[in-house]
Image: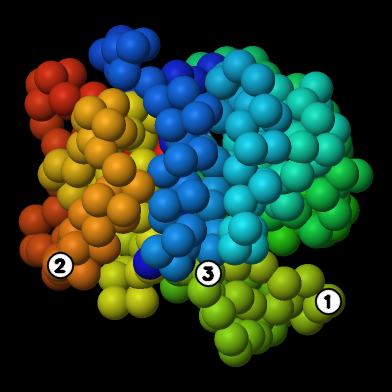
């Protein structure tokens, strides 16, 4: 257990087709959302148990008020080597300085298209201009930052090369993520997935693509183009990596998920608010993690008839099944 994703809100200012395609959502009750002291206490316990990397996510993490205050509290935790955030970039330009000053180490910006009309269609918000301002701000404040792109057949599969070109211009490393059949992806079908091999085939029409060694702890496989540009592919759908997964996630209301696909989480908010001591809570985390046997992405990859993970009516009843609640 070395990597923890912490969702700070389930709200979002975009409605990406592959994550929040519905017209309406059931939000987590406000009183259930963990405050910064509660989040910091949990992260400290996780770090005590071996976590070294924390990523703030959401929903859209920049919608959480005073996020730099939380970053400052987390950045002070001894033993936490890497404090990162994943954002859709819309609000990044206005917050990037404060986040850096508060001690954020790294930022990843999600970007799926460079075409304004397509962006608006894909996210149901005309925000590409602000996202590009956010990208420019990230390039300045967090040089070498990462860009994450979900490819969806028929929507942005024509943009593999333009997106790589943009990343190079920004001094960023692009990672292509296969479209996953996670909770919120109610419109997911297998034929929309642009698989790792499809991406490599597109690029190999133009020139050699070399696989790089040393995957390290990241789930991305890395490659280099003939011009030296490196990029990653996260093939979670076609080539899952459950056996090396060291990651778990905490939702904004304090449920702990040992797997992105897990049907249920472990309630840490209840324990925090019931006055359970640090030692007792740490012991519970350890026992739960040691019993972990999740390998859902591998199981789904071997299923013959693959459909969206959760029927829509179940999602409405249980927002914890959503990707925007679990933090991606
Ligand atoms: N709102 C922020 C953002 O979009 O970067 C952070 C939360 S978002 C849930 C985290 C990541 O999950 C994003 O990079 C997003 O593209 C990715 N994601 C969401 N739904 C996905 C899906 N169905 N398949 C693959 N990746 C997905
Ligand atoms: Fe898009 Fe991220 Fe919002 Fe999901 S949480 S709709 S991926 S911006």
Mark 1 vs 3, N-terminal side: 3
Near-viewer residue (188 or 1): 1
Quarter of the image with the N terminus is bottom left
Report helix, strand or loop for mark 3. loop
Q: Indicate the quadrant where residue 309 lies.
A: top left
Q: Indicate the quadrant where residue 197 lies.
A: bottom left
Label 1 and label 3: CA atoms lie apart by: 23 Å
Find disc 1 in the rendering and name its residue. 227
Nearest to the eye among marks 1 and 2: give it. 2
Mark 3 vs 2, N-terminal side: 3
Residue drawn at (55%, 59%), measured in percent from left and top? 53
Report helix, strand or loop for mark 1. loop
Image position of 309 with respect to 58: above or below? below
Residue 41, given in percent of the width and then of the height, sits at 46, 40
Q: Indicate the quadrant where residue 132 lies.
A: top right
Image position of 239 with respect to 45: above or below? below
Near-viewer residue (283 or 313): 283
Q: How crowded is mark 1: few (under 14 residues within 10 Å), some or many (20 or more)?
A: few
Ligand 1 within 8 Å of disc 3? The answer is no
Find disc 3 in the rendering and name its residue. 218
* Residue 186 seen anywhere in this rendered image of the structure: no
Residue drawn at (66%, 68%), measured in percent from left and top? 231
Residue 259, given in percent of the width and then of the height, sits at 26, 55
């Amino acid at each position: 257990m070395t990597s923890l994703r912490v969702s700070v809100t389930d709200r979002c200012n975009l409605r990406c087709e592959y994550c929040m395609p519905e017209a309406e959502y059931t939000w987590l009750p406000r009183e259930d959302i963990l405050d910064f002291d509660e989040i910091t206490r949990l992260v400290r316990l996780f770090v005590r148990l071996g976590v070294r990397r924390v990523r703030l996510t959401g929903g859209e993490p920049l919608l959480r008020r005073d996020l730099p205050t939380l970053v400052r509290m987390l950045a002070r935790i001894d033993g936490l080597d890497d404090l990162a955030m994943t954002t859709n970039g819309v609000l990044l330009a206005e917050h990037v300085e404060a986040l850096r000053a508060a001690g954020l180490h790294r930022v990843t910006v999600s970007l799926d298209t460079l075409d304004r009309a397509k962006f608006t269609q894909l996210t149901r918000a005309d925000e590409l201009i602000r996202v590009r301002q956010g990208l420019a701000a990230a390039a300045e404040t967090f040089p070498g930052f990462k860009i994450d792109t979900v490819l969806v057949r028929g929507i942005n599969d024509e943009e593999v090369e333009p997106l790589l070109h943009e990343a190079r211009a920004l001094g960023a490393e692009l990672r292509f993520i296969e479209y996953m059949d996670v909770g919120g992806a109610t419109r997911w079908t297998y034929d929309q997935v642009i698989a790792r091999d499809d991406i490599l085939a597109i690029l190999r029409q133009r020139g050699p693509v070399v696989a790089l060694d040393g995957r390290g702890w990241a789930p991305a496989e890395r490659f280099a183009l003939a011009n030296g540009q490196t990029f990653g592919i996260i093939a979670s759908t076609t080539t899952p990596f459950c056996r090396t997964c060291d990651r778990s996630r905490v939702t904004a209301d304090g449920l702990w998920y040992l797997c992105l696909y897990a049907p249920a989480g472990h309630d840490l908010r209840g324990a925090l608010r019931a006055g359970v001591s640090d030692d007792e809570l740490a012991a519970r985390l350890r026992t739960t993690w040691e019993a972990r046997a999740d390998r859902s992405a591998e199981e789904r990859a071997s299923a013959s008839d693959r459909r969206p993970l959760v029927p829509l009516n179940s999602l409405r009843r249980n927002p914890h099944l959503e990707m925007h609640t679990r933090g991606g």
